[in-house]
Image (spheres, rainbow, N blue to C red):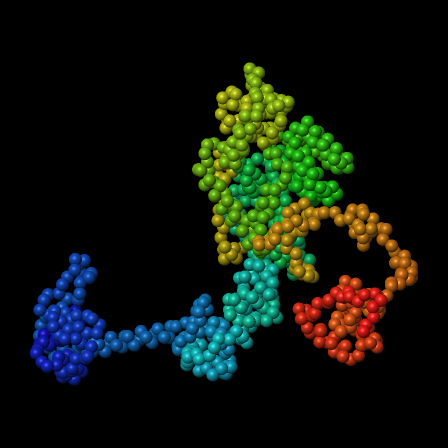
Amino acid sequence: MRYLLNEKGIIDVYVEHVCDEPSILDLLEGGTILQEPIDEGTMDIGEGYVTQNSQPAPNFHEAPETTAEGDANETDALHGGEYNVGDEHELEEEEEEEEEEEEDVITTRSSDLWFNPSWTTVWFEVGMTFEHVAQFKEAIAKYQIQKGCKLKPVKSDPTRQRIHRIGQQCNWSIFASFDKNDKTFKVKTYCREHTCFRSLKSDMVGSRILAEHHRNRIFANPQIIISEIVRLSHLELGVHVSRDKSKLAKERIMKEVKETHTKEFAQLRGYVEELLRLFPQSNVQINSEPPTTPEGKPTFKGIYVCLEGCRKGFLLGCKPVIGVDACFLKGMFKGTLLAAVARDGNNQICLADDLSNHTRRDLTFLSDQHPGLINARQTVFPKARHRLCARHLYANWQKIFKGKLLKKRFWIVARSTYEGQFNKNMEEIKNLSVKVHDALKSIPPDLWCKAFFDTSCKCDVVDNNINETFNNWIMDARYMLIIQLLEYIRVKVMVRMAKNKEEISKWRGNIAPRIRKKLEAHKIEVAKYRCEWNGRTQYDVWHWNDKFVVDLIGKKCSCRAWDLTGIPCPHALSAIGLGNFNPDEFVSIWYKRVKYERAYNVPIMPCNGEKFRENYHGEPLESLPFRCKQGRPKVNRRKGDNETKKVKVGQLEKMTKEGGQITCLLCKQPGHNKRGCPKRPTESEEASASTHQPIPRKPLTCGYCKQPSHTRTTCTARYFVDENSGQSDGLGRKKKHRVGEFINSPELNLQGLQRETTMRHTHPSQFHKAQPPQKSTKKKGSSEA
């Protein structure tokens, strides 16, 4: 007998002897040795016996093997020696202590099993702990939605909750009660067996559970319709909920949305202080109305934000052109967002400078025909230049003068670059319509035509599409709360400025990529021109019968395209090519790398969240009064007749009648229909016209039976051929008789009617062909014998 003692003090005893039946020696508590037969799963003992686990026993005669990895992969060191039964009691005490430790660990785990409300899958266990009875009820409600079973509280009070399955024979049940020691709510008994089918109806799924499930969805889209909530509840929760319950759930969330709006207005001053702490040179101002009562609070009226990075970027690297446009907010409290957008060296969006401190430079404003913007510009910037958006101008103009040809001519006139071209295009419009020509002449051309624009700003745009692009860029933010709206715009501008600064390293050359594309497009047209040099810095450029003068030193061309944009026109490139100069040197500095780097050199810093602006200084603000209008709120803007309508995916595309003119059917004049026609007869005329008696119509008469009230196509008379009548027409055909004729004829009797009935059901092939009448062979004057 040999024994092995490992480092843990546990003795393994092995016996090797020859016997009919192999056995295993176990050490018992009394210190005696028991010989026990080996199990059936134990295989024959050879080099080492193998159990059902297929783990060979160690070889006692050989030293333990070691791996190349060292002590980390070695087995426990085994020490050989003789077995001492006196050490048995010490080993038994150590085993009992280990068993007690294991029991303590299991008990601790069961008592520390807490329910987590953020679990996506709800499950229960005996000993699971809840903070209070309301949390347990919420878990039961989520569980029945998850399993699709109807649960009913059999015992329900603040200290005990017993829930059973109802509607079907199912053994599922759970009981939980209040624990006085821990002051918690614990599960005491639980039968987890389910023998019922899933149900789509659940009485415990109320508006509170629906509101909790759709909370984020309704917060993100307060305009979600009730039918969409019902549909999503069925798809995601697997239960059918009513419209009333879904409507009540949405009302719960909308009440929280309103409270959140009020909370954000109260924290607005703290947000402003945080911005000024991060950007000391920024300009952020809040406009509020004083309280109407001594106990009241000031009411929010407006806020102005100009960040330091945008202000310095505009001053250092953007052209002095600012587009101003407003868009409507679509949240609960509505409102208007007015944004000032500039253009960088790549003709892209860049939020503009702090306009209130920018009076030393000549500015050019782009806006629509809104009188408020025009009056404000004249008051604050009386020396600044102003341009009207040609797209908005045409939208108002085409309401009176419609037609695609006039639209084409209007944009040709607006894009004329010099005065001669403008006058020529206006004469073409005058040939089409004198009224249209006079209407365009009434608008000052320096507001909407390139030929009269100032050339110092190096911008030739005639529309304000860049502001429309910005409004569409922040479309998602227009539904948000006020602080979320400001943060959304700040983050998007911060990311855009960082991205544009990174794109500078990808430039090829010293000019912005968009400007280089335009320059390359102008180079293609150079082959159409012929250029001659005057010996100094000026050139004559011919294009058929037109001739233009180019001055390379002054960077001017008589077509004014180079003067307006700062990009060499095809005429200038023809002269540059004749002099073997580099075209990049004649591009304006606004489009070069230096200006672009300065525009995005000052970054926008990140801002802390809500928890860091709780301790702000200042009186909190009240939100704007909430006004709920009747009917469904309109979200999308009503488009004009000249704008294209969006077509849904998969919808049949076809021409519509929108924008066309209608023609009256009475007077044949355009612009109205017969309902609104001035020549339409009045009610008295219609009444007098109705007194005339209509001309009586001739009554219907059948062509066969000569009877009234029906025609020959609907006549019920039937025709037949009488084989025995002997009558025939001139062509040898049997004479046809109507039924009425046979009834009224004394020559026919009842047998003739029977023959008629028989012939109606006889196939036409069975009829006898009518034989022509035979000529008599009897001589004239002869008599019969």
In the image, is 14 to the left or to the right of 350? left
Q: Quadrant of residue 347?
A: top right
Q: Is residue 372 above or below residue 154?
A: above
305 or 49: nearer the viewer: 49
Residue appearing at x 68%, y 69% in the figure: 764
Q: Is residue 727 above or below residue 289?
A: below
**At which x and y percent is residue 474?**
57, 49
Q: Is residue 147 left or right of residue 87?
A: right
Position of residue 439 in the picture relative to residue 283 (left or right): right
Percent x, y of residue 713: 77, 66
Q: From what the image shows, is residue 126 above or below residue 734? A: below
Whether 67 is drawn above or below 150: the answer is above
Q: Is residue 747 left or right of residue 134?
A: right
Question: Which residue is nearer to you in this view: 164 or 651?
Answer: 651
Residue displayed at 56% across by 56% down: 267
Residue at the (69%, 70%) spot, across then down = 767
Q: For residue 126, say whether it is visible.
A: yes
Quarter of the image for the N terminus: give it. bottom left
Question: Which percent across, then down, holds residue 346?
Answer: 53, 37
Q: Which quarter of the figure has residue 219? A: bottom right
For the point 63% across and 39% down, which residue is it?
463
Q: Looking at this view, is 36 or 373 the one in front?
A: 36
> Residue 648: horizontal and vertical position, in percent?
59, 53
Q: Nearer the viewer, residue 17 or 323?
A: 17
Residue 160 visible in the picture? no
Quarter of the figure with the C terminus: bottom right
Question: How many callouts does the rendering have?
Answer: 0
